[in-house]
């Protein structure tokens, strides 16, 4: 049911100044309040932090949902 509601909210042609839709804003608020501790996204997916090492020896990371591919944080 949540995925259906998020899909409907995605179709509303409203975007924030950062280009996020209403459903993306709800996912971010949910992640900040609840999901960070439970490692769960509002869509029901699992939030995973991936780390990468470039050829130059620089390391980077990203935190995203494995189901909806919502990017929460990167560095």
Image (tube, rainbow, N blue to C red):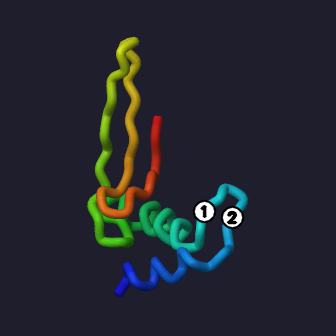
Q: Is residue 48 found left or right of 31 in the rendered image?
A: left
Q: Position of residue 53 (x, y in %)?
A: 33, 23
Residue at left offset 46%, top offset 78%? 7
Identify whether 16 is placed above or below 11: above
Disc 2: which residue: 16
Identify whether 42 is placed above or below 39: below
Q: Quadrant of the N terminus?
A: bottom left
Q: Is residue 49 visible?
A: yes
Residue at left offset 31%, top offset 40%? 50
Q: Is residue 39 found left or right of 25 in the rendered image?
A: left
Identify whether 47 is placed above or below 41: above
Q: Position of residue 41 (x, y in %)?
A: 35, 65
Q: Position of residue 18 (x, y in %)?
A: 67, 56
Q: Secondary structure at mark 1?
A: loop
Q: Secondary structure at mark 2?
A: loop
Residue at left offset 37%, top offset 63%? 68
Number of numbered tags placed on the structure image = 2
As drawn, which residue projects farthest toward the right? Answer: 17
As drawn, the label of residue 20 is 1
As drawn, the label of residue 11 is none
Are the residues at dot 2 and dot 1 in contact (C-beta closer than 8 Å)? yes
Q: Is residue 38 visible?
A: no
C-alpha gap between disc 2 and disc 1: 5 Å
Q: Is residue 74 found left or right of 46 in the rendered image?
A: right
Identify whether 75 is placed above or below 27: above
Q: Residues within 10 Å of mark 1 (few under 14, many from 20)?
A: some
Residue nearer the viewer, 20 or 26? 20
The quarter of the displayed image where residue 5 is located: bottom left
Q: Is residue 74 found left or right of 37 in the rendered image?
A: right
Q: Position of residue 15 (x, y in %)?
A: 67, 67
């Amino acid at each position: 049911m949540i995925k259906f509601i998020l899909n409907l909210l995605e179709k509303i042609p409203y975007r924030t100044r950062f280009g996020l839709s209403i459903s993306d804003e709800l996912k971010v608020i949910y992640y900040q309040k609840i999901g960070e501790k439970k490692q769960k996204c509002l869509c029901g997916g699992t939030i995973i932090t991936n780390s990468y090492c470039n050829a130059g020896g620089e390391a980077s990371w990203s935190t995203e949902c494995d189901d909806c591919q919502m990017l929460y944080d990167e560095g």
